[in-house]
Amino acid sequence: MKTDFNEKQVQILLIAEALFAENGFEGTSIRTIAKKAEINIAMVSYYFGSKDKLLEALILYRTSDLKIQIENLSVENLDPVEKIDKLIELYINRIRCNKGIYRILHFEFSSEDRETKMKVLNEVRTRNLKSLETIIHEGQAKGIFRKEVIIPLIPPTIMGTFFHFYMNKEYFKKLLTLETDEAFENYIQTKLKTHIQQTIKALLLYES
Amino acid sequence: MKTDFNEKQVQILLIAEALFAENGFEGTSIRTIAKKAEINIAMVSYYFGSKDKLLEALILYRTSDLKIQIENLSVENLDPVEKIDKLIELYINRIRCNKGIYRILHFEFSSEDRETKMKVLNEVRTRNLKSLETIIHEGQAKGIFRKEVIIPLIPPTIMGTFFHFYMNKEYFKKLLTLETDEAFENYIQTKLKTHIQQTIKALLLYES
DNA sequence: TACAAAATTAAACAACTGTTTAATTTAAAC
DNA sequence: GTTTAAATTAAACAGTTGTTTAATTTTGTA
């Protein structure tokens, strides 16, 4: 499967990604993409084959972004608590930069099983869960983290909190009096990020 | 606006609700509803006027379920920690029983502003947030809960965790070796519920 | 300049969507 | 039994969807 795209294709991918993030996959028509990209509607099929394959291309295009970063974390010379902080920061930044795909991967086609999608997604999930496990086990071995934690339920808390906040943007903008989209984005990177870090750390450190 | 529905209407509402929970609002066609309910496709328009009004009817039909329950919680003679446990249990049960509407309300039409939907949703949200605030302030006044918590970010963690888990059902069934849907549902009511309760309590009790 | 490949276009396609129509059946009331 | 309203039906409607066609333009190359 090809993973190199020419600039015209990349242009389409980026516009599609933004529209997917805003309106979802099914909520975004090829005609909408074509109009925004100022191309003929046939060009999407011409370049990618179909709308589904456009999505797969987008996933492939972004896969590299999803893969890197996390690996080197468990090697770094930090204590487990700092590693958790850093891991969550990486999580959030990665999701923030790939909202479009993440929304589709995690919240749409929940039942359907697209080959490419599922393969890539499961790889990423498995790797991320392993990184998290390594860090937590290290913290537990050092007697810092408690042991009564179900590790696979931690990513849902991180990602779920983020997406619930993001998907209800207008509500939270009003509630927290964030006037602009920039203020909203800024709130995510400061307050929301800290909230999630606090939450997970508290879960791991708390002694009943 | 009428809130009483005859049994035929209720039958349609319940089937629509289940399909919405599974495939979302836009992912569910009137023809699919009609087929599953074994009625003519025209009957939906006949009884409700339109697909949009069917959704509004469903929201109205379930509103009573959303409203009750929580109110009396802050009055009960429990300590704040127990109240948090109970509140989360109520939260989860209510979402579990209203997956269809919750999915639509919180994850679809994020941009669009349907009058009925927004009105009902905001009422419920405001009330729930107030209940939570009351409990937490009580705990803070008693010196049990820490004060460096952003309360409006707690519901996103509760609901986000739940929904991220629920929306990725197949993945978690495989990961946690839950063979059947019943096992999955059971896991939610035991392990996931406990995880969320632990998480929120840890966040509130943790002393840095 | 001439030729071939790539890119782009408008138009049509079939399948689906929500909704409406007009005819028919069922039910209830008198 | 007749009448009137409610319920149900099949069919058609207009709009949108993703995709394909066949013709045209652009581009690069010899």
Image (cartoon, coloured by chain):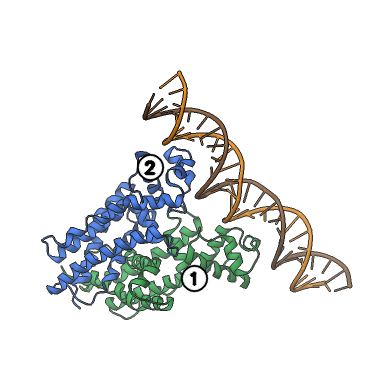
Chain colours: A green, B blue, C brown, D orange
* Marks 2 and 1, how far apart at CA: 50 Å
Task: Say if residue A140 shows up in the picture.
Answer: no
Name the residue that disc number 1 marks: A64
Q: Quadrant of the C terminus of chain B?
A: bottom left
Q: Residue furthest bottom?
A: A77
Choose between B6 and A44: the one closer to the eye.
B6
| Residue B80 horizontal side relative to residue A152, left or right | left
Name the residue that disc number 2 marks: B9
Residue at 30%, 62% in the rendered image: B123
* Disc 2: CA contacts within 10 A as few (<14), some (14-19) or many (>=20): some
| Residue A2 horizontal side relative to residue A195, left or right | right
Badge 2 marks a residue whose secondary structure is helix
| Residue B121 horizontal side relative to residue A208, left or right | right
Choose between B44 and A63: the one closer to the eye.
B44
Choose between B122 and A150: the one closer to the eye.
B122
Chain of the residue displaying label 2? B
